[in-house]
Amino acid sequence: MPITPQEALQRTIEHREIFHDEMVELMRQIMRGEVSDMMVAAILTGLRVKKETIGEIAGAATVMREFSRRVDVADRQHMVDIVGTGGDGSHTFNISTCAMFVAAAGGAKVAKHGNRSVSSKSGSADALEALGAVIELQPEQVASALAHTGIGFMYAPVHHPAMKVVAPVRREMGVRTIFNILGPLTNPAGSPNILMGVFHPDLVGIQARVLQELGAERALVVWGRDGMDELSLGAGTLVGELRDGQVREYEVHPEDFGIAMSASRNLKVADAAQSRAMLLQVLDNVPGPALDIVALNAGAALYVAGVADSIADGVLRARAVIADGSARARLDAYVAYTRQLAVQP
């Protein structure tokens, strides 16, 4: 018998696990709108208080993928998602979006799944709009952009319509829930490789093992000791790496890659316009901490995508495509192509 919402709530109160298959059935009920808002809020709170397990997260992610509008991609070689849970409160410019253009110029296919701002002053969707790109593309248009430019941005509300069911509850609760953890796990293009930033050190090992359970090929899950959900310049970064079916946890530092340490305050912006300006400075090869952190994160993406042999090799490749202008050219090509798609009948 499937678990009832009441039984699930009782489990969380008793700090007992909802097993994977039970979580799948429970999430299906929630996503179909069959569970009351009050009960959804209670279950989400119970899960948060007892702390979500690998099996619970993997089960919930499986259902979110099931309910999503998929992007069909024939060739997934060197495909990568660069994504963060958000919620790190750093208010930096949009590092992962900038890294997307650099990684694409470096030879990766970047299928990026994103939304509007959570922790930064400018989420990936906000940043792309500020750059002139059209973000609300249909799945077949995303696939076309990926094939033609090496970049496909999947705006979460377009691809996860069932999330509207829980949106009012999440908004009223106003706290982090399992859904903040699930977003980066539910790439609609099924990217086999992922560079994922997380908002808490405990999630480094957890998310790497969830991705292992979900069948990812390679992953780097990262948390900067200064609180950033990126590979950081301001402190060491904890890394959970999934490769060859195994998870390994370790720590890296900017000096390992010949990069000077720099506090995250040097990357802070007040709004989407400032984020856009800093992003363009990086792609125009203006030296400084912003360029360094993008090179580091794009380098990690190139490594996890199988384009580079190591993060260090990826950083060198990233710097090269920034310096020769091909990363900026990739941005311009992507913006132009999305605008072209938007006016096609």
Image (cartoon, rainbow, N blue to C red):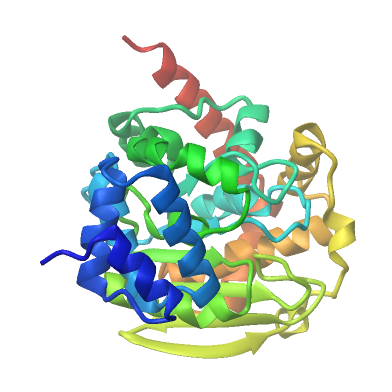
Q: Position of residue 192 (x, y in %)?
A: 32, 64
Q: Position of residue 197 (x, y in %)?
A: 58, 65
Q: Is residue 21 above or below residue 90?
A: below
Residue closest to the eye, 87 or 218: 87
Instruction: Evaluate whether residue 76 shows in this view.
Output: no
**Residue found 63% across the figure and 73% down from its top:** 200
Image quadrant in which the N terminus is located: bottom left
**Residue found 69% across the figure and 51% down from its top:** 119
Q: Is residue 328 above or below residue 10?
A: above
Q: Describe residue 106's horizontal placement relative to residue 40 as left or right.
A: right
Q: Quadrant of residue 216?
A: bottom left
Q: Position of residue 239 (x, y in %)?
A: 57, 81
Q: Residue furthest left?
A: 1
Q: Position of residue 15 (x, y in %)?
A: 44, 81
**Residue found 39% across the figure and 32% down from its top:** 158
Instruction: Evaluate whether residue 146 shows in this view.
Output: yes
Residue closest to the eye, 46 or 327: 46
**Residue found 40% across the figure and 20% down from its top:** 341
